[in-house]
Image (cartoon, rainbow, N blue to C red):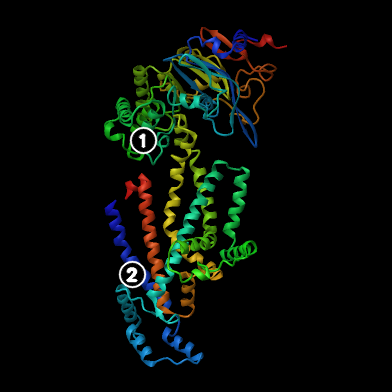
Amino acid sequence: MTEIQAGRTAIDELAPSAQGLNGALLSVRDLQTHFFSREGVVKAVDGVSFDIKPGEILGIAGESGCGKSVTSQSILRILPKNGKIVGGEILFQNDDQIVDLATEDADGRLLRDIRGKEIAMIFQEPMSAFSPVHTIGDQIIETIRIHQVVSKEEAHDQAVEMLRRVGLPNPARNIDEYTFNLSGGMRQRAMVALSLSCRPKLLIADEPTTAVDVTIQAQMLELLRDIQADLGMAIIMITHDLGVIAELTDRVMIMYLGKEVEHGRVEDVFHRPQHPYTRGLLASIPKMEPGRVEIEPIQGVVPNPYAMPSGCKFHTRCPDFIAGVCETRDPPLVEVANGHEVSCFLYGGREELD
Amino acid sequence: MLIYIVRRLIVMIPVTILISIIGFIIIQAPPGDFVSSYIAGLEAQGDIIEPELIDSLRARYGLGEPIYVQYFKWVSSFIEGDLGYSMIYREPVVDIIAQRLPSSFTISLLSLILVFAIGIPIGILSATKQYSLADYSFTVVGFLGVATPNFLLALVGLWLLFKWTGNVAIGLYSPEMQNAPFGIAKFLDLVGHIWLPALIVGTAGTAELIRTMRANLLDELPKQYVTVARARGVKPTKLLYKYPLRIAINPVISTVGWLLPVLVEGEVLVSLVLGLPTIAPVLLDSLMQQDMFLATSIIMILGILTLVGTLLSDILLAIVDPRIRGAV
């Protein structure tokens, strides 16, 4: 057992409220979220841990199906019906109390109070984030009035103010418009305003730049950076686009098949990638420099989620596969530099094999 | 919106004219005319008809003249409110329709209310508790409802009612109330009789509505705006009725209008089985006996009902759905 795991086990023995979060706003510990269907069990998130401090921007990156979106849905407890959190803790500093979101009733009072007020989320598709038959103002005002005791007029003014802040051209008029009246960029902004209407402490952005074209994508990142500087909330940025991570975030966690493979400051992970998967991801980005026309895709394909490989989940595609080691057990997280952790036998953990 | 309604009303004029032409031609298509078949029928029974009546009828409606002359004569008197004279009932058509249409309307309206009151909640339940025992049960009941002919249900209903209460639920009123002036007692009597035909006429519609409602809602529930609303802290109940239900119900609203004439048609056999004084059996009689004025009048009324119903649906839909409002 590594020091980190040992440390976590020690923490787990204490009641969540007694231990404190070491200044973190949210602490996800060994989260396991599984999906149950007729075909079998998919371990979408299989033991993920990370902390995020107030005002910090964390990126979670990985291919489709790596569990990054499920992680965010687990935090807000908005998983689809067949998804269940089967293990781990999601500790959240809720005012002066620490609550474990993983064990609360998913549609109970506490979760409903936290959603939209303390932790808000923005989604991939701005067109479908709003109900098509209600005005955007209707939905923003509704959110404000769920979480604050204010009159309709006051909520309306707050909503207009938030729309102005996200840069809509004519907030007083835009508030009474439907999504189909707005352009793509305006919808994005309206969606950000909807999420931020109660000034959450944590914003989870789930692939907010995936479904939009490049100009709007750039505007979106700029908007998030401005708003973050303005309101000071923490952001978890979930994306498969490493460019977005490099642009926006302080730290990054790379995921593969429900596992965390590498974790560290963005400059460390991008300049000195350790895990073969991270290296593969970075090598597969097309480069603009002359002479570097070849991109190097990661070999093989993502395994069938119902038949996960044993041991390290990446061993079937890994160029540095160590026979007799990688397929036999899970690699532990190893700290290779200050705050830079990798889960790979190349960097240690082999000595513990019997 | 007002412009839209006016435009729709204007479009209705040529459509109404077209319905009248087609209706008139089809009713006129069989050889002979109603006066001759009427005379033949009466003579077969040994009755004697006054020749003056026959001549005046022939002259008035231009029988024997070219079909377009007949059509214009009929249309002009129709517009003036003279719907003609029924040969079978020996009464002005207006009187027959005035007697029968209110019962038809009452049964249809009540059926419609029952269809919605039963179909929508069950549809919602089936969708929110998909693949539960209740969902499966209602699916089976629903398919049976669609597949069972109304007249069979009417017979079964009659038999069951007779078994349980000893009453024969025929007609809309008890015999002693038949000619009583309309008041509270007569109304209660009507309520006691009308639920059975209303329920039977509405069975197929209810079953269909359950399926439609279930499918529409299942389409909407996994949509992102529902998840987003949930992620904003919206309560589960409001999450259902404010968002997905509001959208899932639109296709239902758009069909309300033409449900009305469908219900009137649907009650033909039920009315025959249960002996109800509605318009449907009259339509059947008039068609079989070539009672031209009666048949064309009823067809015209059903046609206009469809047009008005469709317009009402479209207006309703524009009121509830801003996407349509924006387009009109």
Disc 2: CA contacts within 10 A as few (<14), some (14-19) or many (>=20): few
In which quadrant of the rendered image does the C terminus of chain A lie? top right
Residue type, mark 1 in image: Asp
Q: Which residue is mark 1?
A: A138
Q: Does dot 2 land on a helix, a strand or a loop?
A: helix
Residue B79 placement, left or right of B48? left
Residue A338: percent from the left, percent from the top?
51, 7
Q: Secondary structure at mark 1?
A: helix
Q: Position of residue A16 (x, y in %)?
A: 56, 14
Q: CA distance from mark 1 to mark 2?
A: 45 Å
- Examine the rendering and report whether any part of residue A236 can be seen: yes
Q: Return the residue nearer the eye: A325 or B272.
A: B272
Residue at x-position 32% and y-position 38%: A177
Looking at the picture, tell me which residue is in the foreground, B320 or B50.
B50
Q: Judge if badges 1 and 2 mark residues of a common chain.
A: no
Q: Quadrant of residue A138?
A: top left
State the image quarter where residue A165 is shown.
top left
Residue B17 is labelled as 2
In the rendered image, residue A108, in percent from the top left (x then y), is placed at 52, 28
Whether B176 is drawn above or below A247: the answer is below
